[in-house]
Image (tube, rainbow, N blue to C red):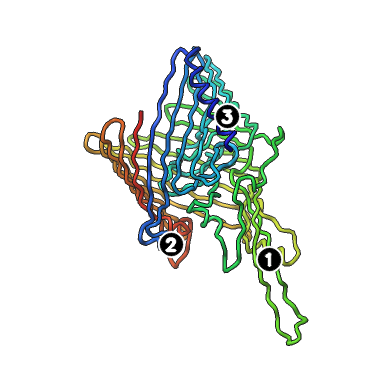
């Protein structure tokens, strides 16, 4: 890790000093932020515990030369909790998880009259949804943090070649992605979220979960494992419409549960008593699997409103099977599958309204898995509604934001309240409250599992 960090640091410094020699224009921008999150009293398990403690330096270099440009964006992170995780592609992390160096983007851009080319690590944003992943599947996410997280900032760059056809009203992009980049998972020992994803034990049974990205089975680096994507967008006075296609890999692995040290029932006991199955430990391994997506979206202006529609179809997508299903299959000597393939359809309808000083967004999302099987670790139909409201005050120095999501099946819920105050054009102070509640009749639903991550976060940020 140290040698890789040194090489990357030398490359970045060398590029910084070399760029002025040929660049017609060179710009540097960035920000420094510090944030601290604390569990709220009603969380019980995490009451008063620090759930977030990070200082992040984010810097961007942009260099321009005629029709070409170079962009490099990287982050240096110090994490007081030691919660940083690597994925082997986008982040270099110290052994104790307290330090991370992330290269988010580093690409060369060229733009002609009708053609454009971008080569290198780049972040791609698809779809019209607000903070919900539907067609936005091309870039993996940093899923190692759940407290005060920002959906847009969670995207990780992909190493790709993008060729674009540009006209006045149409843009078509073709992507070739030679190397698979997975999402960053909460594998670090100091990450509060790891205990939720991989509990130390269940019903007294010891769990041995992956501790590093190298413990997971990644696709072999071979041309046959490349990813491909396509987007075509049309911009008209009536609506903005886009079509999408993606063939690649699911960004998160599918886990397989394997019991060890099992004592089976014995019918040979002299006192005719039974010795029941006793599992002393379970090993968890993970493997990434192929995925295809076909999608479309539209944004339609209607007076003061904008109607947003988005839909994604996943043919024969893999879905995680439950640990209970896998264990039962193994005990009966049957073939065990970590996932089952089913067709999936996700649809969204949204409405944006921006009256004076206000921004209001409402969305409804429906998620269907066809021919559902009880072995799958999710319901066949899930749907939710979201609402966000933002208001600026005091000559745009104070911003109030409130957003929430309601699970319409179990009625679990999540909410975020944020207050931003600008001391000046460069410095912003923020307070962010994240709240999660289970559903009726003690059902967990979509958000109940995160009840113990309800927290308040204080953040300071300076931009330059």
Residue at the disc numbered 2: 45
Any mark on residue 7, and which?
Answer: 3
| First of labels 3, 1 by sequence position | 3
Which residue appears farthest toward the bottom when viewing the image? 271
Q: Is residue 449 left or right of residue 178?
A: left
| First of labels 2, 3 by sequence position | 3
Residue at the disc numbered 1: 328
Q: Position of residue 169 (x, y in %)?
A: 48, 23
- Helix, strand or loop status at disc 1: helix
Which residue appears farthest toward the right when viewing the image? 268
- Nearest the eye: 49 or 177: 49
Front of the two marks 2 and 1: 2
Picture quadrant where residue 151 is located: top left
Q: Are there few (<14), some (14-19), or many (20+) residues within 10 Å of tag 1?
A: few
What is the total number of numbered labels drawn onto the structure image?
3
Identified at 49% across, 19% down, the residue is 17
- Nearest the eye: 108 or 318: 108
**Residue 356 appears in the picture as rendered:** no
Picture quadrant where residue 60 is located: top left
Q: Position of residue 79 (x, y in %)?
A: 45, 44
Front of the two marks 2 and 3: 3
Identified at 59% across, 34% down, the residue is 3
- Helix, strand or loop status at disc 3: helix
Picture quadrant where residue 290 is located: top right
Identified at 51% across, 57% down, the residue is 196
Cα separation, mark 2 vs mark 3, equals 42 Å
């Amino acid at each position: 890790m140290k040698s890789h960090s040194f090489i990357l640091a030398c490359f970045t410094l060398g590029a910084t000093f070399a760029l002025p020699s040929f660049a017609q224009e060179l710009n540097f921008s960035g920000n420094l932020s510090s944030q601290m999150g604390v569990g709220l009293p009603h969380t019980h398990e995490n009451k008063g515990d620090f759930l977030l403690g990070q200082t992040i330096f984010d810097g961007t270099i942009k260099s321009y030369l005629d029709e070409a440009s170079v962009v490099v964006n990287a982050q240096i992170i110090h994490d007081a909790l030691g919660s940083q995780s690597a994925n082997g592609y986008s982040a270099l992390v110290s052994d104790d998880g307290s330090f991370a160096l992330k290269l988010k983007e580093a690409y060369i851009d060229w733009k002609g009259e009708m053609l454009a080319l971008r080569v290198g690590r780049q972040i791609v944003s698809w779809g019209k949804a607000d903070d919900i992943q539907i067609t936005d599947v091309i870039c993996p996410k940093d899923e190692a943090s759940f407290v005060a997280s920002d959906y847009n900032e969670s995207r990780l760059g992909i190493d790709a070649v993008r060729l674009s056809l540009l006209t006045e009203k149409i843009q078509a992009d073709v992507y070739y992605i030679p190397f698979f980049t997975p999402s960053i998972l909460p594998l670090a020992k100091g990450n509060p979220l790891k205990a939720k994803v991989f509990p130390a034990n269940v019903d007294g049974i010891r769990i041995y979960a992956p501790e590093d990205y190298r413990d997971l089975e990644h696709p072999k680096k071979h041309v046959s494992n490349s990813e491909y994507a396509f987007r075509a967008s049309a911009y008209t006075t009536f609506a903005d419409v886009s079509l999408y296609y993606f063939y690649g890999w699911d960004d998160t692995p599918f886990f397989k549960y394997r019991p060890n040290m099992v004592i089976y029932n014995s019918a040979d006991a002299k006192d005719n008593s039974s010795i029941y199955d006793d599992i002393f430990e379970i090993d968890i391994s993970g493997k990434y699997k192929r995925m295809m997506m076909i999608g479309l979206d539209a944004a339609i202006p209607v007076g003061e409103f904008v109607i947003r529609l988005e839909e994604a179809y996943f043919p024969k997508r893999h879905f995680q099977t439950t640990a209970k299903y896998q264990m039962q299959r193994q005990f009966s000597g049957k073939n065990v599958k970590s996932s089952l393939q089913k067709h999936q359809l996700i649809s969204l309808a949204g409405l944006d309204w921006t009256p004076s000083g206000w921004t209001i967004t409402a969305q409804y999302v429906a998620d269907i898995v066809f021919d559902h099987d009880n072995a799958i670790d999710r319901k066949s139909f899930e749907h939710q509604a979201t609402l966000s409201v933002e208001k600026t005050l005091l000559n745009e120095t104070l911003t109030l934001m409130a957003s929430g999501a309601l699970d319409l099946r179990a009625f679990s819920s999540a909410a975020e309240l944020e207050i931003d105050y600008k001391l000046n054009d460069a410095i912003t102070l923020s307070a962010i409250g994240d709240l999660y509640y289970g559903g009726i009749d003690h059902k967990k639903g979509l958000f109940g599992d995160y009840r113990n991550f309800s927290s308040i976060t204080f953040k300071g940020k300076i931009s330059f």
